[in-house]
Image: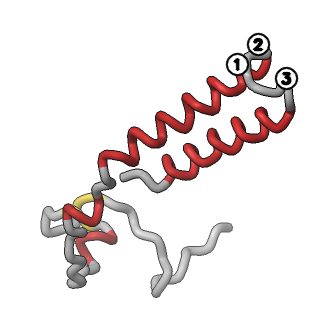
Amino acid sequence: MATKAKAGPGKAQKKGRSAGGRTTSARTTARNDRYTPPIPKNAKTSPKWMGIGIIALFLIGVLVVILNYAGLLPGGVNNLWLVAAIGAIFAGLIMATRYH
C-alpha cells in the first residue's frame, strides 16, 4: 500500500490556479527587490575601426595563404608565411570576441 507524502517544506506543488483564482508559481511568491542599473550606451559600443580591423585581418590571412600556395610572395613557398597568415586570422578572431 502506498503511503501519503508528508506536508512540509520542500514538497513540490502543482502550478495552476489557487482557490483565490490567481496563478501560483515561484516567481509570484518570491519578490525580487534588487535594482540593477542599465549598462551605459557608450560602454557597450566598440569603435568603428574595430569592425574594419576584424574583416581586414581575416582577409589578409586568407590572401597570404592563397598567395603563398601560388608562389607569389617574396621567398617563394615558405611555411613562415602560413604562420603569419594563421596569426592574422587568430588576431581577427580575438578581436571579434571582444566586439560589441
Classify the position of the N terminus by image quarter: bottom right
The answer to whether residue 75 is left or right of residue 8 is right
The residue located at (77%, 34%) in the rendering is: 81
For the image, the number of numbered tags is: 3
Residue 27: percent from the left, percent from the top? 29, 70
Disc 1 versus disc 3: distance between alpha carbons? 11 Å
- Helix, strand or loop at label 1? It is helix
| Residue that badge 3 annotates | 77
CA neighbours of label 1 inside 10 A, class few (<14), some (14 to 19), many (20+): some
Choose between 75 and 2: the one closer to the eye.
Answer: 75
User: Residue 75, located in which quarter of the rendered image?
Assistant: top right
The residue located at (21%, 81%) in the rendering is: 35
User: Residue 42, located in which quarter of the rendered image?
Assistant: bottom left
User: Are discs 2 and 3 less than 8 Å apart at CB?
Assistant: no
On residue 70, the disc is 2
> Given the image, on which type of amino acid does mark 1 rest?
Ile
The residue located at (86%, 29%) in the rendering is: 78
> Given the image, on which type of amino acid does mark 2 rest?
Ala
Choose between 97 and 95: the one closer to the eye.
Answer: 95
Residue 8: percent from the left, percent from the top? 46, 86
Disc 2 versus disc 1: distance between alpha carbons? 6 Å
CA neighbours of label 2 inside 10 A, class few (<14), some (14 to 19), many (20+): few
